[in-house]
Amino acid sequence: MTSMKGVQLTSPGQYRLRTDLKFPEPGPGEVRLKVAAAGICGTDVHICSGDPSMNGLIAPPVTLGHEFCGHIDKLGDGVDEKKHPLGTYASAEMHEICGDCPACRAEAFHACATARIRGINLNGAFAEYVIVSAANVIKLPEDLPLQVAAILDPLGNAVHTTMKVPIENKTVAIIGFGPIGAMCGELATFLNASHVFVVDVADKALARARAWVIRRGLTDKVTIIDGREKPVETIIDATRGGVDVTLEISGHPVGINNAIAMTRPAGNIVNLGLPKGDAVSIEGFSKNFIFKGLTMHAVIGREMFRTWDRMLDLLKRGLDITHLVTAEMSIDDFGKGMDRFGAGLEQKVVLYPHKMP
């Protein structure tokens, strides 16, 4: 085999499905995996639409895709087959770290100052095969469904965000009910938050959130709020002063300011959402932030490898995100999947490079 099929970004905003990508060979310390399934991420939408905020990160030509699962296919020199048996069902952390910057030396590997990301500036998993560092491989339970295993990367983001501070018996607000916001909702209720407030401004997202509440029987534990209708006042009134923890997923400046305003004094705000611009103005900074004694946390990726351990344990204990995958298709239909996901018609799209299950 000398070539393979995959989706390649050729320049910002320009991508195509190719059948002649170079078949990858693992180098020293690397592993090749045969990709079984891969998920489309919101980041992929920004990359493929030519969003200027991504242009400084991408390195075309590059094979896209950073959410995936597969099976170990070949080992590079120096990789112990006893630790990485051929055929092992696995996923991988796609942040390739330096191991030597201050963050890495402090074992905060997820915040590596010079991390490169497979599927963004290194070849990724929208292909029949992908190369990763052996140290990044995560062995998966054999009974974990492919469509769930394919989206562990964003679930890890949600786990890192939701578990940044303890939320059991706490009131929690989630701003943004896209795929990761929906995962945070599942996690917050699974982890026994006392009450969850979900805020969004998109009709499709609000409809999905309301359907989720009914399907899960959560009408007494979750309140859905239209963000166009005074969400801060609604939450402050309902909680008599603000929520204990706010998870800001939208990245919109209004959402960020609302998160600060709707969190109680001495509460916590966890920021995962990325603004499109370089700057965000904070309204009433002294009154709403300093004088309230708030703590703001920044989340990037998944803690290596604490988040993965927590995530797999939660799935073992019964956390269910299967319903978030609303479309499955061949990688040949990548363009269709991207269009539907980008338009908000699907919550998560999973692609199959070889054959549909």
Image: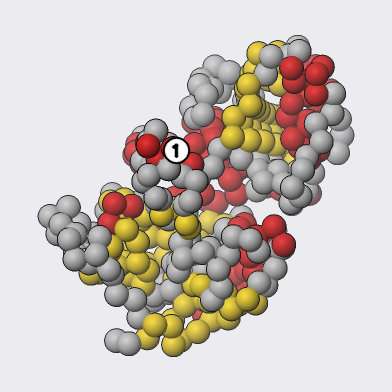
Asked whether 208 or 301 is in front, the reply is: 301
Residue type pointed to by label 1: Ala
From the viewer's perspective, is residue 294 above or below residue 333?
Answer: above
User: Residue at horizontal 27%, vertical 57%?
Assistant: 134
From the viewer's side, name the closer residue of 83 and 146. Answer: 83
Badge 1 crowding class, 10 Å Cα cut-off, few under 14, some 14 to 19, many 20 or more, is some
Q: Residue furthest right?
A: 229
Q: Which coloring applies here?
A: secondary structure
Circle 1 is placed at which residue position? Answer: 103
Name the spot of residue 310 as percent of width and height, x first.
38, 35
Query: Residue visible at 47% across and 57% down?
Result: 116
Q: Where's the N terminus, which quadrant?
A: bottom left
State the SS at label 1. helix
Q: Looking at the picture, how far across and down is residue 28, in whole percent?
A: 24, 64
Q: Quadrant of residue 283?
A: top right
User: In the rendered image of this protein, does residue 119 appear above or below residue 92?
Assistant: below
Left or right, 222 with respect to 327, comes to right
